[in-house]
Amino acid sequence: MIDNPGMREVGIADTASGLEITFETIIKYAENCKFKDCAHGHEKGCAILEAVKNGEIDKDSYSNFRKMEKEKMHFESDAKERKKKDKDLGKMIRNVQKQRRNDEY
C-alpha cells in the first residue's frame, strides 16, 4: 500500500516509453502483427494474440498490458484536451485585450 496525500489516482506519466520498457517482450511480438494499426484485441493476424494462445505470452501479462495501454491512451487524450483548452484560453485572452485596446481609441 502506498500513501499519496492529496492525490486521487496514480497513472502513467511517461507515455513515451513506459509500456515499451515494461512490456518489452509483448511489444516485440507486436512488430510481427499483420496490420500496423493492430489493436491487439481481436484482429486476425495479431502476433500478440497468437503468442498468448500458444502460451508464449502469459495471459495475466497480456491482460495487464491491455489495461496499461488503455490508461496510456486515456492519459494522452487528456493531455491533448488540456493543451487545446490552454490554447483556446490564450486566444480568448488576446481577443479580449485587443477589444479593450480598440475600445480605448
Image (spheres, rainbow, N blue to C red):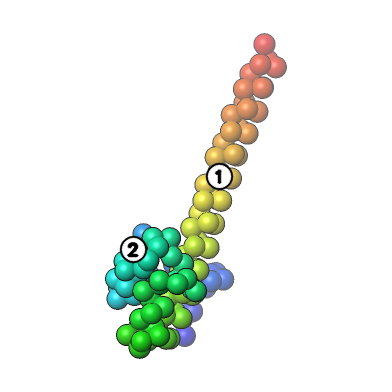
> If you read the primary sequence from the N terminus, does the residue marked by circle 2 or circle 1 appear first?
2
Give residue 30's position: percent from left, percent from top: 35, 69
Residue placed under numbered mark 1 in the picture: 84
Decide if residue 6 is on the left or right side of residue 51: right
* Label 1: which secondary element: helix
Amino acid identity at mark 2: Ser
Residue placed under numbered mark 2 in the picture: 17
Decide if residue 51 is on the left or right side of residue 64: left
Q: Residue at x 50, y 54 (%)?
A: 79
Camera-side residue: 4 or 38?
38
Q: Quadrant of residue 24?
A: bottom left
Q: Quadrant of residue 86?
A: top right
The reply to whether callout 2 and callout 1 are in contact (CB within 8 Å) is no
Decide if residue 46 is on the left or right side of residue 56: right
Q: Residue at x 37, y 66 (%)?
A: 34
Cα distance between the residues tagged 2 and 1: 23 Å
* Label 2: which secondary element: loop
Camera-side residue: 4 or 9?
9
Q: Residues within 10 Å of mark 2 (few under 14, many from 20)?
A: few
